[in-house]
Image: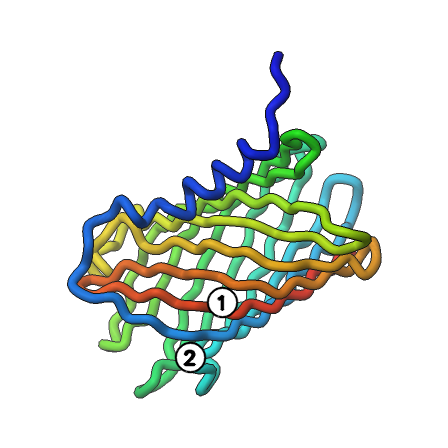
Amino acid sequence: MPRRQPGHALAMLGLLAGVTSALPVRAATIDDELVWGAWFNTATLSDRLSVISDLQVRSSDNADQVRNVLARAGLAWQLDDRHQIVAGYAHVITHPDSGDSLTEQRTWQQLSRRDTVASLPLTHRLRLEQRRIELASGDTTTSDRLRYMVRTTLPLSGPNYVALQNEIFLTLSGREALNDRVFDQNRAYAGLGRKFSPSVDAEVGYLNQWLQGRADDTRNHVLQVALITRW
């Protein structure tokens, strides 16, 4: 069998990152500049069982205030060397520019697969979310959402690396109360990372979040800083 080259992995990421170019042009696109901070952790309980969690704080435009706080955790089971399943819960608090804070509660299930393509690690992640969302109108709606992410890292000198990933979000149900679209958003990310130890990484990078709205779209230019730990 012919050996696949790194270009295959990068081509896949590029294809997913460019998915929005094939969508219809909307009336207008709003550009915002945000800052996201995140802490991702994996706590190993046994050879197969672990708890994965993340805590994220996201700003409003121009980092004027905190807009979102997200706390998420899940129980993970390692099926084999390449496959893992997870089930968990997430709680999201949103502080709009005006009005009271809104909350979202999610249960979620996830399947991930790890591959190696020409010595480069490639991770696929498929996540299904059941969302209970508080709306600004005071009503509450439910929605199911499917997410697919692909990620790779390219080694640099020493402990440094480049991280590339793309994630697509599709709304499966409850669209009428949201943006009334199947395609919800796309997140393309490129960052620089450093492995400080076998259990601690840090990354800083640029994330382009494209959200499809009911009338206008939003393109968020995000400075993302992340701490990644393993216990």
Q: Quadrant of the N terminus?
A: top right
Q: Is residue 210 left or right of residue 64?
A: left
Residue kind at label 2, given as amino acid type: Ser
User: Is 183 above or below relative to 94?
Assistant: above
Residue 136 spot, x, y in % from top left = 27, 77
Residue at left offset 78%, top offset 52%:
157
User: Is 63 above or below relative to 171?
Assistant: below
Of residues 173 and 152, the one drawn nearer to the viewer in this rendering: 152
Residue 76 spot, x, y in % from top left = 64, 46
Residue at left offset 43%, top offset 61%:
208
Residue at left offset 32%, top offset 49%:
20
Q: Any mark on residue 91, and which?
A: 1
Q: Secondary structure at mark 1?
A: strand
Residue at the far top in the pictured view: 1
Q: Is residue 30 left or right of residue 106?
A: left
Of residues 135 and 96, the one drawn nearer to the viewer in this rendering: 96
Residue at left offset 70%, top offset 52%:
161
Mark yes or no: residue 178 visible.
Answer: no
Q: Quadrant of the C terminus?
A: bottom right
Residue kind at label 1, given as amino acid type: His
Q: Which residue is mark 2?
A: 60
Dot 1 alpha-carbon crowd within 10 angstroms: few under 14, some 14 to 19, many 20 or more: some
